Image (cartoon, coloured by chain):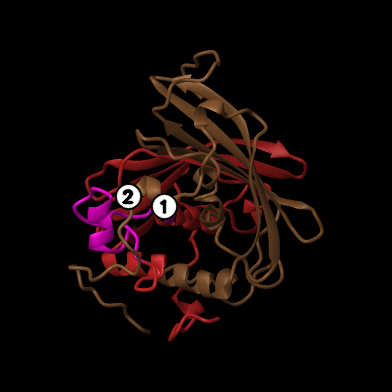
Chain colours: A red, B brown
Amino acid sequence: MTTPNFVPDPTAFRPMATPASRDLPVGFALEPVVRTISLEKSRIHEGWPGIRTRHCDYEAAHATGTPAPIANGGQVALVLGELFIKFFREGYIGGTLSFNLIRQTQLDDVLTAKGVITDKRPEGDRVRLELDVWLENQNGDKVLVGKASGLAD
Amino acid sequence: MRTPSNDRKGTELAEPKKAEHEKFKGTKDLAAAQIGDLIGEIEFVVPQEMVERFSWAMDDYNPWYLVESPFGGRIAAPTIPLTFDGSMFYDYYKYPEGGSLFAKQEFEFFAPIKVGEKYRLRGTLIDTYPRKGRTFFKMGVSITNGEGAEVLRMVKTVATPVNPVQSPERESK
């Protein structure tokens, strides 16, 4: 099944200007990824109106004790996943990603995924880059913190 | 592109209202959880519809997801497998009265998850420990492809306020 009226547009994709490379130094900051999870985007993610969850429907949110829908942690994690695969490209295979969600994300929060190289070491004929990664909201509060690693040539 | 309504009032529910604990089917008491418990085993396919919907939801039009990847065919975004183990824990264990928190997720990538291919996901309890008045449960998840090769390993940690089980206190994990 194809999503109704969805038109894939690969031209809308912008690769990261500086992807992973063995030459990048410890301390290098990745190009951030910025995304806003609006009610509209949350509803697309959840499959509304067929599926009504506390992440996309006011009544469902009220039923679970929250005054308004809140972002789904899985959708928040997609922002981190975008940073991860844009940076490491094919080198995400052989890589790792871990994170803790430390603060609730409200709808319309502006999330910025960031990362910085903390270590690099040879692995076979490639180099493993270790990263600290995190998501911040528009107030500069961290909502997710984690670690990532991947392989670079 | 089709645009869903931006109606903030919400309308009638497709299903009767349910509290969080009523959404799950689990019956096994968490206090009796044993390391090695087989929490669940499912087969899944990442459908094209899901990949398109998530791309649209995130404005992430990576051609690897929508057209072709260097791995041959289209692949799923790295964190999409979260969707498939999300409810598994509490479809096995009874949801605790005091609620539950998602604490941590870990991934180890061995091969991409390809759109439209069949995978098997198996979740087992691999650790449990008390910390700061809560009990933490770690579910290890292994995803294998049609040939039985492991393509992804995940660990999901959830925290509950149920009484700590017998295990040494740890300061950090």
Amino acid carrying mark 1 in the image? Lys
- Marks 2 and 1, Cα distance to the nearest angstrom? 7 Å
Up the image or down, B59 lies above or below B153; here it is below
Residue B90: % across, % down: 50, 44
Question: Residue B23, which numbered label?
Answer: 1
Q: Is residue B118 visible?
A: yes
Q: Which residue is mark 2?
A: B19
Amino acid carrying mark 2 in the image? Ala
Quadrant including the N terminus of chain B:
bottom left
Question: Do dots 2 and 1 share one subunit?
Answer: yes
Residue A1: % across, % down: 55, 81
**Quarter-wise, where is residue A31 in the image?**
bottom left
| Residue farthest to the right, as pictured | B147
- The residue lying at 29 percent from left, 67 percent from top is B13
- The residue lying at 46 percent from left, 25 percent from top is B135
Tell me: B156 left or right of A105: right
Tell me the magenta residue range.
Answer: A52-74
| Residue farthest to the top, as pictured | B168
- The residue lying at 35 percent from left, 58 percent from top is A34
Residue A44: % across, % down: 38, 70
Q: Label 1: few (<14), some or many (≥20) within 10 Å?
A: few
Element carrying mark 1 = helix
Tell me: A69 left or right of B146: left
